[in-house]
């Protein structure tokens, strides 16, 4: 008698009880909700705004109070929008090339932008005033993230390095070296212990965030790594 070809496979119900399945499923659900939220925001902005960016929009970031969104563009500017009305509230000008990355402090007071002009600018979110310009990278900046307490800025660049900056003073206090190609994305654990960098060379590197020591290299992707997400307790990482 021929064996049932599916008899050796786990059932759908047993798979759903595996922690990794549950974690991935939860993450995908959050991503789907985020995509819906972003689409709704873009629709509101398109429906209500007159004018706006004049070139490609590279990234958007929703403020922590969910009332505003900041966009960055190839037109060298960042813009602050009111979500409910789709109205542009502020234009941040000063960069001399594409603004590629951004982050906002937990209290929604400070905006940080990274540009292909090799600089990071720190702005007062509400007034649009540029309060500091951070220089050190020698090529385009591709990614920015903040520590959980918003005291440290992490940046990744096409110069193959990542850097750690003190937000309050603008001082660069650590340089992470080891990648051979451009760093596309950067992320840190919530406790601030470890930094992860995704690279054009298809690898992900794990670093001791404080000392800059390389801890581990993750292999598996066959092309550039563009996205990194670390779960809240820092035990799992998702990459794309």
Image (tube, rainbow, N blue to C red):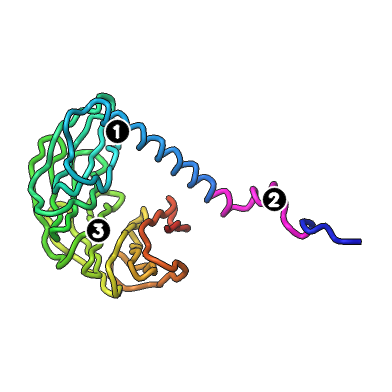
Residue 216 percent coordinates (x, y): 40, 72
Residue 26 percent coordinates (x, y): 51, 45
Circle nearer the N terminus (3, 1):
1
Residue holding disc 3: 142
Segment tinted magenta in the rendering: 8-23
Find the distance from the CA under tag 2 to the CA under tag 1. Answer: 39 Å
Indicate whether 70 appears above or below 199.
above
Residue placed most toward the observer, 218 or 168: 218
In which quadrant of the rendered view does residue 155 lie? bottom left
Residue 113 percent coordinates (x, y): 18, 50
- Which image quarter is the N terminus in? bottom right
Find the distance from the CA under tag 3 to the CA under tag 1. Answer: 26 Å
CA neighbours of label 3 inside 10 A, class few (<14), some (14 to 19), many (20+): many
Indicate whether 72 appears above or below 118.
above
Residue 51 percent coordinates (x, y): 16, 32
Nearer mark to the viewer, of 3 and 2: 3
* Image marks 3 and 1: residues in contact by CB distance under 8 Å: no
Residue holding disc 1: 65
Residue holding disc 2: 14
Name the residue: 37% across, 62% down: 225
Nearer mark to the viewer, of 3 and 1: 3
In which quadrant of the rendered view does residue 120 lie? bottom left
In which quadrant of the rendered view does residue 4 lie? bottom right
153 is within the stretch colored magenta? no
Name the residue: 16% across, 63% down: 172
């Amino acid at each position: 008698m021929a064996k049932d070809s599916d008899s050796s496979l786990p059932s759908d119900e047993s798979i759903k009880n595996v922690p990794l399945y549950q974690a991935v499923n939860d993450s995908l659900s959050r991503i789907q909700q985020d995509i819906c939220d972003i689409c709704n925001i873009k629709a509101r902005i398109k429906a209500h705004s007159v004018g706006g960016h004049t070139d490609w929009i590279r990234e958007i970031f929703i403020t922590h109070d969910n009332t505003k969104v900041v966009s960055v563009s190839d037109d060298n500017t960042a813009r602050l929008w009111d979500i409910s009305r789709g109205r542009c509230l502020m234009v941040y000008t000063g960069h001399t090339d594409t603004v590629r990355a951004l982050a906002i402090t937990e209290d929604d007071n400070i905006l940080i932008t990274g540009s292909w002009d090799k600089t990071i600018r720190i702005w007062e979110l509400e007034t649009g005033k540029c309060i500091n310009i951070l220089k050190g990278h020698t090529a385009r900046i591709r990614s920015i993230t903040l520590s959980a307490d918003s005291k440290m800025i992490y940046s990744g660049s096409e110069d193959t390095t990542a850097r750690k900056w003190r937000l309050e003073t603008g001082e660069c206090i650590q340089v992470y070296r080891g990648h051979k190609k451009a760093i596309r994305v950067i992320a840190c654990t919530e406790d601030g212990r470890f930094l992860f960098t995704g690279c054009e060379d298809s690898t992900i590197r794990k670093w001791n965030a404080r000392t800059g020591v390389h801890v581990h290299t993750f292999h598996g992707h066959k092309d550039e790594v563009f996205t990194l997400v670390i779960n809240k307790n820092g035990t799992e990482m998702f990459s794309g």
